[in-house]
Amino acid sequence: MEMDLNAQEKKAGFFQRLKDFPRKLKDGVTKRVKNVKKFGKDDPRRIIHSMKVGVALTLVSLLYYVRPLYISFGVTGMWAILTVVVVFEFTVGGTLSKGLNRGFATLIAGALGVGAVHLARFFGHQGEPIVLAILVFSLGAAATFSRFFPRIKQRYDYGALIFILTFSLVAISGYRTDEVLIMAYQRLSTILIGGTICILVSIFICPVWAGEDLHKMIANNISKLAKYLEGFEVEYFQPEKISKETNSCVREYKSILTSKSTEDTLANLARWEPGHGRFRLRHPWKKYLKIAGLVRQCAFHFEILNGYVLSNDKAPQEFDSKIQEPITTMSREVGEALKAIAKSIKTMSKDSAQTEKDLLKIIPGVTMASILIEVVNCVEKISEAVEEFSGLAHFKETLDPKLSAEIGQHQLLHRGSVKPVLDGDNEKEDNSSSSHVLITVHDEEQPPTATAKNVLGAEKTRVDVV
Amino acid sequence: MEMDLNAQEKKAGFFQRLKDFPRKLKDGVTKRVKNVKKFGKDDPRRIIHSMKVGVALTLVSLLYYVRPLYISFGVTGMWAILTVVVVFEFTVGGTLSKGLNRGFATLIAGALGVGAVHLARFFGHQGEPIVLAILVFSLGAAATFSRFFPRIKQRYDYGALIFILTFSLVAISGYRTDEVLIMAYQRLSTILIGGTICILVSIFICPVWAGEDLHKMIANNISKLAKYLEGFEVEYFQPEKISKETNSCVREYKSILTSKSTEDTLANLARWEPGHGRFRLRHPWKKYLKIAGLVRQCAFHFEILNGYVLSNDKAPQEFDSKIQEPITTMSREVGEALKAIAKSIKTMSKDSAQTEKDLLKIIPGVTMASILIEVVNCVEKISEAVEEFSGLAHFKETLDPKLSAEIGQHQLLHRGSVKPVLDGDNEKEDNSSSSHVLITVHDEEQPPTATAKNVLGAEKTRVDVV
């Protein structure tokens, strides 16, 4: 009886699942489609790039579809298709770098290959394959080894690969054909056709410039630092007020910690690009990496600070309430300075405002203070580097009045340091007793002395953290 | 007269340069050759890899040199050469990943391509190229778009590329040939031959395993952390004693800051590799990335600490001499613990020793202390992660006696925290005056109290940093 019930239940369950299946399938498909749509919407350039690849493929396939073209090139048209597929990259710099590498490597390796075939023929029917094999082995191995050198790897890795490929193809298949010159010529010309199609489509249809991406990325990274500092006050002093949205916004700086390889790649590709928009041909792309390094340094400090904020080892409330005001002011001011720097990069306009305030005067606290001081130093270094860079990158000198007023409010920072003020431990007879270090926490009303004092002979050791 | 002298001098200078030229050329060439030799010696696997590529190329060229093979495959042998050149990677994982991606993508795209050609023929002579163009455009664009999805990009990027390539080649050239099935078959079989040669040479001649590289890299990174802590004492307290060699040794940790992309790549490739040496097929490669993340966190702290050590904002000597002993002990002990962890990973043996000492009791100092505490916490997290990992990775439980004794000396650490001891500022009537924070620096003779005290009502605010 029970088994019957179980069997019935199972049967009912099965039919239920069968009934639900179309709905579940529909839900699943809808969800997938939504995800894909969202992914495309996040960066519509992805969709445009996919279309561009389609256009380039259609163009290159004309080599087969149009009779006169097919008569000239025949099946070697496939090298043009192959070139389009492997050379077309997301950015103009990527496409140019691959296209030029492929073109020149094919030219050089093709010439060498033809030479190798002719050389090998001197060694007779028996010697020919041996000489060819030795040449292919040694040039292939040498070119492979060259790809390990950082300089070649960075800019000419693809060229070295194509060199090996073309030389091997021409030299080896040259053994079986007498038309090695024609073969090399056809390969070169079809590759040039494919490469040219890629470069033209890449540049003239909604181009994606690696240089512009790099420029925006650095400015955005500086904005992310500013966002962290903006959210810092709430996060540390009023953690209960944090919304989920604010939280993820504040955490954005984390992406900077590991963005080095992306920045390096973009800077490398940007150097292949012609002048475009606001960027000239010899734009100082390498300088971006210097700024990016300093921004990352700053993000490292935030990472440490963040660990401290999240930990349970917080100072008691009485201490917190004392430091809240100055720390809030400090992080706001530095945040504003960062925003101004990010804006200056985004608009490519020099920030002509000079320092007024010495922010370091208002920082108290023990651990956080010194880390925050490092942050201040770091931000100042970033601003110096951007300043130097703005000259090289020909930033506009004039600002529009609205922007000028906004940036003018937020001043850049002085460099500062913590100078502990210590007294010597004169109580030699009482060595085993603990000595005391005094840290003065100044209220804003009473401006602290900026210079470090060293009052010898006093009973207590004092550390003046300003 | 003067002009004559000038001309004579110029002439003499020119002859001197001409005379020096052969010597300079020789020096230059010798230097280059030495550099290349050194580069090869630094990692002899680079030379071996180059040779292996040469071997694979020679093997695949037999398709042309050996008459019966040439009769079977003809010029399609070039796909085998092409496959060898583009698929052969430095690591076994890289070669397997590319080879399998290429093989399966060619199979699927080839089948679809043949299907597309047959479908297009239904539309008559006029409709055929249009249908083919639409199919190539849409499948090419869709596959290109799929390459943006992180999951596909990470593991199947090359497969998607080859899919676009093969489908386009078969579909487009199918328009001009009636032997589209034969073409697709030849392309597939030669690619399989090329891929198989690559995989066999890669695995059976001096294999380079991505997994082993990752394993060694993580262990080495932990050793680098240990080296920094070892050198820390000398660097901070006796900077005059630092040799150039020690300095670069101490700075080794810097490479960890930006090693994320290398680790990610290696872990990704390691998952393609079969079991090898001490690693089984389903070795927990992802766990390495977790440890690596913690190691990098620790390196971030070092970077901050390093900025502090190099800055001029050091504490006065009296203070330094007081903290030297405990800081030295602390950094030595943590350094030893790290060394033990690195050794445990290197030898894949579990460290069964338990905590004894509470290192946090001996850390004084203001800024450095709290950062060092973070370092201690970080190291403990690393040791926990390694512990978890060692279970998953089937580390040996037993140790050889020598190693056991060595590791036994260096204990793992307790988790700890800095708890500032504060008094409330009860002197409400004197709000404008500066309040004082007291930091107690304990001498080793007098063990400090481990618990935080909160003595309310006292006149001075005290921070007890232990």
Image (tube, coloured by chain):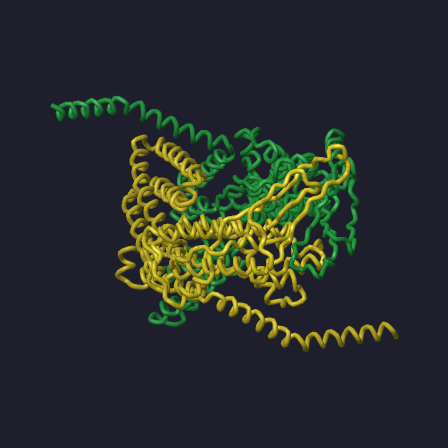
Chain colours: A green, B yellow
Q: Residue furthest left?
A: A1
User: What is the quadrant of residue B212 in the picture?
Assistant: bottom left
Examine the rendering and report whether any part of residue A437 can be seen. yes
- Depth check, front residue: A403 or A179: A403
Residue A40 in the image, given as x and y percentages of width and height: 47, 32
User: What is the quadrant of residue A54 in the picture?
Assistant: top left
What quarter of the picture does the N terminus of chain A occupy? Answer: top left
Examine the rendering and report whether any part of residue A176 can be seen. no
Rendered position, A121 above or below A203:
below
Q: Is residue B318 left or right of residue B248?
A: right
Residue A157 in the image, given as x and y percentages of width and height: 50, 55
What quarter of the picture does the C terminus of chain A occupy? Answer: top right
Q: Residue at x 74, y 29 (%)?
A: A402
Q: Is residue A101 left or right of residue B396?
A: right
Rendered position, B46 above or below B4:
above
**How many numbered circles are shown?**
0
Q: Residue at x 53, y 55 (%)?
A: B359
- Depth check, front residue: B53 or B185: B53
Residue A131 in the image, given as x and y percentages of width and height: 39, 69
- Depth check, front residue: B397 or B10: B397
Q: Residue furthest right?
A: B1
Q: Residue furthest front?
A: A429
Residue B132 in the image, given as x and y percentages of width and height: 37, 35
User: What is the quadrant of residue B146 in the picture?
Assistant: top left
Rendered position, A90 above or below B66:
above
